[in-house]
Image (cartoon, rainbow, N blue to C red):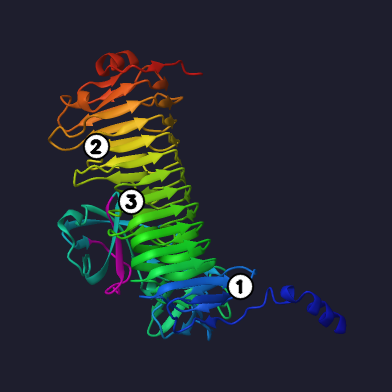
């Protein structure tokens, strides 16, 4: 025993490496101009309140790993419930938003059960489905449904009188239930019929752990909330911090000079960061698994940098929900999105807007749960110039039949798409009612449905004056390089773009598909569209 004690004194850090230390409390008051030092390797429970603070630095002290901020707290006092399933319950005083047992994320109980995720029901009235459910106790449950290829919505159930289920909220006319609506319902304990799920009923939390064992000593639950509240703040610096099990990692609306560096975000119920204001610098972040989005900027955000960060699994935590993307700038402007790696996103990889640069990013496997989607996406519904550059990115393996490596949507104009590698995607590039864009020096390699789709869907000649030049197109199969489609038929397709200096290593037959003509070969395309490029034989 003396030897063991001496050994422990010599190797003290290792003796406690596997010990479960109690959570620490975050400071309740933080003065302007202060530095908040959090002990390395420790977990701090609760929200760090930096609202309206100025010149505050938050960082880890020591070299034993980042300090963790989490909304989750341990829950004990479990009992085994009777029945065939290994379900355990414990009294709970909060409404949990997240539950984990043995450091494994638990999904809110849903119907239909795993592994099937969706059912289909008929709808003849707005806000009402016709379906038969095995249990009528669904009032107050959440109906999650696909409103469109690109949109998942969620509404509380108002009533269910078999076979009619009515949701509580009025649905916007453009998002009414489709005639055949895909859906699932979540949140009632009769739905708890599979391992890895939980529910709450009459003040008790019920879980079925992945391994079926007791949750005692290994369960943490988190309410809704943010780990760090930096709303209305100025000059906030967050460095070498880990955030996990919160609804939002950092919320920073109307922030000025926000700097987050070398920090980790894991298992966020909605998104890792929401930021607005100006002068926002996010660098070397590692984001793993969120329920909705990775990083989202509010419409007022300006002077943004996101660089050298990895986002893996944005929108992929738990069951499918509405997602906008891994890096989302819907109306935010003046951004530089540089050198990031984006993997396994439920929807868009990078959504950018005006006066922005998207450069040297690596995007793999976006659009996993929603389609009509892009690895990189932008639009200009106001018709004004975007003045945005999308350059030197690699976009591959984008999923979904209506998805593209790069998607210029809704009058996108004055965008430079230069030097990108766009390969092995459902589609290469779509220009939807887009005009005056430069598509130059890109590699389009073995995209499955077409390399470039021109898609004019309005009854006016709006898709025009795009420049397709010096690109390299490669495909081993008879996949069209171009598809030109217009609601106006064939009369406008000659104005869609000019084509010069491109290299085509593709099939001669079925080179392109034109509205009003169907498939045409290389000779027909070159003659009609005055393409000055060159077709090279395929290596078969």
Q: Which quadrant of the structure image shows residue 306? A: bottom left
Question: Mark 2 or mark 1: which comes first in sequence?
Answer: 1
SS for dot 2: loop
Q: Position of residue 270 (x, y in %)?
A: 39, 65
* Disc 3 packing (10 Å; few <14; some 14–19; many ≥20): many
Report whether residue 326 is seen: no
Residue ID at (40%, 26%): 471
Which residue has dot 2 on it? 434
Look at discs 3 and 2 and give the one toward the viewer.
Answer: 3
Q: Is residue 477 above or below residue 380?
A: above
Residue 135 magenta-highlighted: yes
According to the picture, the residue beneath numbered tag 3 turns out to be: 334
Question: Which residue is disc 1 drawn over?
Answer: 41
Q: Secondary structure at mark 3?
A: loop
* x and y, in percent, of residue 173 in the image: 15, 57
Badge 1 marks a residue whose secondary structure is loop
On screen, residue 128 versus residue 86, left or right, reads left
Task: Provide residue 264's location: percent of width, then percent of height.
Answer: 52, 63
**Relative height, residue 35 to residue 287 (above, below):** below
Magenta range is 130-148
Give the Cα separation between the discs numbered 2 and 1.
51 Å
If you read the primary sequence from the N terminus, does the residue marked by circle 3 or circle 1 appear first? 1
Q: Nearer the viewer, residue 524 or 460?
A: 460
């Amino acid at each position: 025993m003396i030897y063991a004690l001496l050994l422990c004194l010599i190797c003290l850090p290792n003796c406690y490496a596997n010990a479960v230390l109690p959570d620490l409390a975050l400071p309740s008051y933080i003065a302007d101009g202060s530095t908040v030092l959090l002990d390395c390797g420790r977990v701090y429970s609760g929200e760090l309140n930096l609202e309206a603070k100025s010149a505050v630095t938050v960082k880890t002290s020591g070299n034993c790993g980042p300090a963790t901020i989490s909304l989750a707290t341990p829950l004990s006092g479990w009992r085994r419930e009777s029945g065939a399933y290994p379900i355990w319950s414990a009294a709970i005083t909060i409404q949990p938003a997240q539950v984990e047992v043995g450091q494994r994320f638990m999904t809110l109980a849903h119907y239909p059960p795993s592994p099937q995720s969706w059912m289909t029901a008929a709808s003849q009235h707005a806000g009402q489905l016709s379906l038969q459910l095995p249990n009528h106790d669904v009032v107050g449950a959440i109906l999650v449904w696909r409103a469109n290829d690109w949109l998942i919505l969620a509404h509380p159930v108002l009533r269910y009188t078999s076979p009619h289920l009515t949701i509580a909220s009025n649905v916007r006319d453009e998002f009414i239930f489709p005639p055949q609506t895909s859906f699932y319902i979540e949140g009632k304990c009769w739905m708890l019929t599979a391992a890895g799920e939980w529910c709450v009923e009459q003040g008790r939390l019920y879980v079925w752990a992945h391994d079926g064992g007791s949750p005692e000593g290994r369960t943490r639950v988190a309410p809704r909330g943010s780990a760090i509240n930096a709303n209305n703040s100025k000059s906030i610096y967050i460095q070498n911090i880990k955030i996990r099990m919160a609804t939002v990692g950092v919320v920073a609306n109307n922030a000025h000079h926000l700097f987050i560096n070398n920090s980790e975000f894991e298992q966020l119920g909605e998104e890792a960061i929401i930021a607005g204001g100006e002068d926002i610098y996010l660098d070397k972040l590692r984001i793993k698994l969120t329920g909705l989005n990775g990083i989202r900027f509010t419409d007022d955000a300006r002077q943004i940098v996101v660089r050298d960060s990895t986002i893996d699994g944005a929108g992929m935590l738990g069951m499918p929900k509405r997602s906008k993307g891994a890096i989302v700038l819907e109306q935010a402007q003046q951004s530089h999105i540089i050198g990031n790696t984006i993997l396994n996103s439920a929807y868009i990889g990078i959504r950018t807007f005006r006066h922005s640069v998207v450069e040297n990013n690596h995007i793999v496997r976006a659009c996993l749960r929603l389609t009509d989607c892009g690895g990189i996406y932008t639009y200009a519904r106001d018709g004004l110039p975007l003045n945005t550059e999308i350059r030197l990115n690699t976009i591959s393996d984008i999923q979904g039949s209506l998805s593209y490596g790069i998607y210029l949507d809704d009058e996108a104009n004055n965008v430079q798409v230069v030097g990108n590698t766009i390969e092995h995607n459902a589609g290469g590039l779509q220009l939807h009612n887009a005009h005056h864009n430069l598509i130059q020096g890109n590699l389009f390699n073995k995209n499955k449905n077409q390399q470039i789709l021109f898609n004019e869907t309005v009854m006016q000649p709006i898709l025009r004056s795009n420049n397709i030049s010096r690109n390299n197109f490669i495909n081993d199969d008879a996949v069209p390089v171009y598809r030109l489609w217009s609601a106006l038929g064939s009369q406008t397709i000659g104005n869609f773009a000019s084509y010069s200096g491109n290299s085509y290593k593709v099939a001669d037959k079925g080179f392109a598909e034109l509205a009003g003509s169907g498939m045409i070969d290389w000779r027909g395309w070159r003659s009609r569209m005055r393409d000055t490029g060159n077709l090279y034989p395929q290596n078969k």
